[in-house]
Each structure stands twice: as structure tokens, then as C-alpha cells.
């Protein structure tokens, strides 16, 4: 049963990542990978809320498997972040490469802590 929850969540997260990435990136005329940045930060915020809700007793471990592991696991993408950062550096856009790496880590951590705090304030 647990693996099925992860699979179902991933079936929603992967297309959501692709569609969000393409939509966001099409609205920005820059080399900075705003689409990947957006899905990663949104996924971190979502995962923070889910984890905080489970920790506070406001959601079950099944919700964490479905949405945290499945949806957020397929929505976020460290490999694409790494690839795009490397691509930017190789193309001579070192500033954008560094900004992508630093901003993604800082914003992702900020989002997950914000999500957990939000969940704690609601369910804690």
C-alpha cells in the first residue's frame, strides 16, 4: 500500500513539474532557470507544511507518503538544478550559475522552514 501512495503522488508531481517549469520559463526572457527554481521552492514549502502537519498530528504518515515523498519527490529536481547550474557556468554565465546555486539552497531551506512553522501554527 505504501509504495502505491508514492507512485500516485509522483504521477501528479512529475507532470506538474514539467507544466510549471515550461509556463514559468516561457514568461522570463533570461538564462536564469526560473522554472526549476519555482518548482523546487514550491516543493520545499509544500514538504515543510506536510512534514510539520505530520509532526503536529494534523496529518497521517500516509499523507506524507502521498504528498511528501510522491508529489514533492517528483515535483522537485536536484538533478536539473545541478545540470542547469553547470550549463550556466560552462556557457560563461558564472554569475547566474552562482546565483542559481545559492538562491536555490537559501530559498529552499527558507521555504521548508516557513512551511513547517506554518503547519505548527495551524496544527500545533
Image (cartoon, helix red, strand yellow):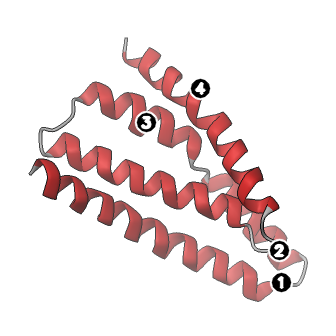
What is the quadrant of the N terminus in the image?
top left
Determine the residue located farthest toward the right in the rendered image: 91
Q: Are marks 4 and 3 in contact (CB under 8 Å)?
A: no
CA gap between label 1 and label 4 equals: 34 Å
Residue lying at 49% horizontally and 28% vertically, measured from the top left: 9
Residue lying at 74% horizontally and 88% vertically, measured from the top left: 95
- In the displayed structure, 124 sits above or below 25; it is above
Residue 108 x, y percent position in the rendering:
47, 65
The residue wearing badge 1 is: 93
Label 1 or label 2, whichever comes before in sequence order = 2
Q: Are marks 1 and 2 in contact (CB under 8 Å)?
A: yes
Mark 3 surroundings: few (<14), some (14-19) or many (≥20) residues within 10 A? many
The residue wearing badge 3 is: 69
Q: Are marks 3 and 1 in contact (CB under 8 Å)?
A: no
The residue wearing badge 4 is: 11
Disc 4, SS: helix
Q: Are marks 2 and 3 in contact (CB under 8 Å)?
A: no
Picture quadrant where residue 13 is located: top right
Q: Nearer the viewer, mark 4 or mark 3?
A: 4
Disc 3, SS: helix
Residue 7 x, y percent position in the rendering:
52, 22
CA gap between label 1 and label 2 equals: 8 Å
Disc 1, SS: loop
**Left or right of 122 in this view: 112:** right
Q: Nearer the viewer, mark 1 or mark 4?
A: 4
Q: Which mark is residue 31?
A: 2
Q: Nearer the viewer, mark 2 or mark 3?
A: 2
Label 4 or label 2, whichever comes before in sequence order = 4
CA gap between label 4 and label 3 equals: 12 Å
Number of numbered tags placed on the structure image: 4
CA gap between label 2 and label 3 equals: 30 Å
Amino acid at each position: 500500500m505504501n509504495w502505491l501512495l508514492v507512485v500516485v503522488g509522483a504521477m501528479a508531481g512529475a507532470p506538474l513539474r514539467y507544466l510549471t517549469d515550461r509556463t514559468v520559463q516561457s514568461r522570463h526572457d533570461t538564462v536564469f532557470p526560473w522554472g526549476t527554481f519555482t518548482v523546487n521552492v514550491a516543493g520545499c514549502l509544500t514538504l515543510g507544511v506536510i512534514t510539520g502537519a505530520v509532526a503536529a498530528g494534523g496529518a497521517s504518515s500516509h499523507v506524507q507518503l502521498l504528498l511528501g515523498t510522491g508529489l514533492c519527490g517528483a515535483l522537485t529536481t536536484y538533478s536539473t538544478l545541478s545540470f542547469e547550474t553547470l550549463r550556466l557556468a560552462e556557457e560563461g554565465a558564472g554569475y547566474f550559475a552562482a546565483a542559481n546555486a545559492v538562491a536555490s539552497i537559501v530559498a529552499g531551506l527558507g521555504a521548508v522552514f516557513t512551511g513547517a512553522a506554518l503547519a505548527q501554527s495551524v496544527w500545533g
